[in-house]
Amino acid sequence: MNDVAVIGAGMTVFQRRLKETGKELSYLATKMALEEAGITKKDIDMVVMGSAPDAFDGIHQKGENLLDGAAGAGKPYVRVFNGGGTGVFAPIAGWWHVASGVADIALVVCEEKMGNCYPHPQTAFRHIWDPILDRPLAPNLVWLFAMEMNRYMTKYNIKKEDIARVAVKNKRNAVGHPCAQLPDEKITIEDVLNSEMMAWPVQRLDISPPSDGASALIFCSKDKVRQFTDDPVWVDGVGWNIDSTMWTNRDLSFPRYVANAARMAYKMAGIHNPRKEIDFAEPYDPFDYKELHHMEGLLLCNKGEAPILTREGVTERDGNMPMCPSGGLMGVGNPIAATMGQKICELYWQLAGKAGKRQIPTDPQVGVGQAWGDIMQMATVAVLRRG
Amino acid sequence: MAKKIEGSPGYAPGTRVSTKDIVQKKISYSWWEPEVQYSWSMGQAMSKFIMGLKDGKILGRTCIKCDRVLVPPRMFCEYCYGPTDNWIELKDTGSIETYSISYLDSDARRIKDPILIGVISIDGASPQHGFMHYFGEMTKEEIHIGMKVKAVWKAPKDREGAITDIKYFKPLKGGGKK
């Protein structure tokens, strides 16, 4: 396999509604990534598009709709999709385009426009439930996460205030992010605990917002990378794994599929002790408890230990193991696939020393990013390293 | 283009708009309401399971090789990837595996009286084998993980062959206490 480096990244504003179309957002994010890499559309060999359920945009097979904005016209182009896992799966697909040797330079574009859907993007989520067993019960997708959060809290005796700390940390971290939808310097644990009850134990400030947005990333082969930078950031390992769709037959307290995906990525990256060898992480945080759940799934701590480490400040930007220095989905926003901006673009910006106000002060060398999707079953993981 | 920012991303493109901008037609937009219907054949496993519910029975399927009793039942085992073996009638009791107290309906509209919803592990099936359903005849203070529950069925004449032929699960006698 060829070594693969990142040479550019881009990201639009994340917001509940943006005026630009999905195609225009794809163009804006791609343009920024091309500018950072110092290349143009003609230098791109192949394009990967990542976008989650068509039902949000309201345009079926939206890969084609987004194509022109993603610099894909006239090129090998493919859309990949695994729900919330897409934000890290699309860059994994971009990576294999280059690692396999079929492309020297691959562009990855991720887009989501949830604001198109009325009365609420939740209405579109109705259509992902099993039509025979689940839909007659008129479910809301938040139920799934509430049930998983409850199981996790009960099994490890976790207090809600320790989960709320994640929301506070990430919304504060997002203050340094120019694209952020919900940065909040002054938010407190009490604000989270006093916010509207949605589906116990999930409250309003435990959830990331639905958003519009796009992000882009450019991968380059080892042979060509010295044309662009003397200090590349490398993709050292990737992993993905999916558990059975029979979600009512699984113990929801631990995401074993995340651990499987992490082991695959760590093995490829030559990482034997992730707790010591990984300097920071961007675990997927559409809900505050998910950062904790995923920290454990990524084998960065013991089961049930993530809330304790969070309480002790270990996961703060200046702690020993920073989590979501970007501000995550909780602070920057959750345009599903486009969260590649926080989960992978941020790894690149941090490792390249380009994260500005969000920069981790301890000179990180290795970071892991992860996303999670489908019916609480899909994990996608990538390990990036400073050259 | 937004102003230059120190650090990456170097600027933040995109134009924020609000719902009000759309309602008041301050921005151009088009509107579409799809009209589409679907019917799903329930297949071999689910047809039998759902017809069982109509008869007031919860049916499972055994995988002898994996030593599992599967609920919901399926005709093949996702682990050993062989055909499953036999139908088995289970009790209509179980325990609460996890639950939520929901103030949201399926369109994320707020509701005043919360829905008690969760996953029930059915007695006699393998651990964590069961399905999602409502809970009733208990308060949101009483409900807890591990609570023993029993199905409350619709009257036979009202059953139509659906998961909702069970109205909800109620505390099994003495199961309401924490």
Image: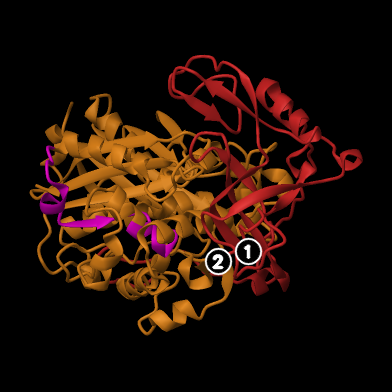
Chain colours: A orange, B red
Picture residue at 43% right of the left edge, 37% below the top:
A72
**Badge 2 amino acid:** Trp
Identify the subunit bearing mark 1. B
Q: Name above or below for residue A1 compared with residue B13.
A: above
Q: Quadrant of residue A234?
A: top left
**Residue A167 vs residue A359: left or right?**
right
Whether label 1 touches label 2, CB < 8 Å: yes
Q: Residues within 10 Å of mark 2 (few under 14, many from 20)?
A: many
Q: Name above or below for residue B107 compared with residue A185.
A: above
Picture residue at 44% right of the left edge, 61% below the top:
A287
Label 1, on which residue? B102
Q: Name above or below for residue B152 compared with residue A189.
A: above
Q: SS of the residue at dot 2? A: strand
Image location (x, y in percent) of residue A170: 34, 69
Q: Quadrant of residue B65?
A: top left
**Badge 1 amino acid:** Ser
Task: Give me the C-alpha separation between circle 1 and circle 2.
Answer: 6 Å
Picture residue at 51% right of the left edge, 38% below the top:
A249
Label 2, on which residue? A200
Q: Name above or below for residue A3 compared with residue A248.
A: above
Magenta residues?
A270-292
